[in-house]
Image: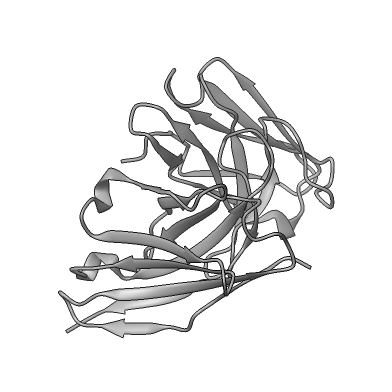
Amino acid sequence: QVQLVQSGAEVKKPGASVKVSCKASGYSFTSNHVHWVRQAPGQGLEWIGIIYGSDGSTRHAQKFQGRVSMARDTSTSTFYMELSSLRSEDTAIYYCARETGASGGIPFDYWGQGTLVTVSS
Amino acid sequence: QSVLTQPPSVSAAPGQRVTITCSGSSSNIGSHHVTWYHHLPGTAPKLLIYEDNKRPSGIPDRFSGSKSGTSATLGITGLQTGDEADYYCATWDDTVGAGVFGGGTKLTVL
């Protein structure tokens, strides 16, 4: 069965970087796009970016320009999202999610369990 | 401030019907399919509706989706207390070149 298993919770100081991993199994690794989404405490869902399944290219929300890096390792079927220059507002649960084969609308059928990133001095 | 606008909350009695609206623009809902998610905070969101009105396997037909122009609607009939959750609409936006979520709607079953 399809599974996305994320790395564990992180506590970081302001200005530091965090790298969250998402290991995929149960499907052909390159057949689906994978997205990153976060939810800050008391806030709604926020789209961070996408790693395209076909070639591993990425695209991210303008808000994270210069701070986010996404990648995949085909040898281990693992996706990565790194966020730098962390600030308190980046405290959130970060999710990876697999996009279905449906046409558009960012439909995600499988999600990782979430990784809590806490930014605190 | 979300690109997609949802009411912050809706409520209805058990057994009743409720609708949740999602208002956007020509660059998002007007150009792309809409997706709806069910979310309990602290857990992974669950896909409820995709391509405007399609239900994944396992989602009961009490849940329905529709779209007209630049707005979409999620309908839930036969409300159950277990339906209490946050509901989010989502789609792609061509102007910002990014995925976008609505602000979320908290459903309370009275």
Residue B110 is at least partly visible in this image: no
Quadrant position of residue A68: bottom left
Identify whether B31 is placed above or below B45: above
Of residue B53 and residue B19, the one placed in the foreground of this image is: B53
Q: Quadrant of the N terminus of chain B?
A: top left
Indicate whether A89 appears above or below A99: below
Residue B64 appears in the rendering: yes
**What number of labels is visible?**
0
Which colour scheme appears in the figure? Answer: one colour
x and y percentages locating residue A10 in the rendered image = 37, 83
Q: Is residue A23 left or right of residue B28?
A: right
The residue closer to the viewer here, B53 or B7, is B53
| Residue nearer the viewer, A41 or A22 | A22
Spot occupied by residue A52 in the image (x, y as percentages of width and height): 51, 48
Picture coordinates of residue A96, whole percent (x, y):
52, 62
**Residue shown at the point (78%, 46%) measured from the top left:** B56
- When the figure is inspected, residue B29 is found, relative to residue A102, above or below; the finding is above
Q: Residue at x 43, y 40 (%)?
A: B100
Q: Horizontal and vertical percent for residue A71? A: 42, 62
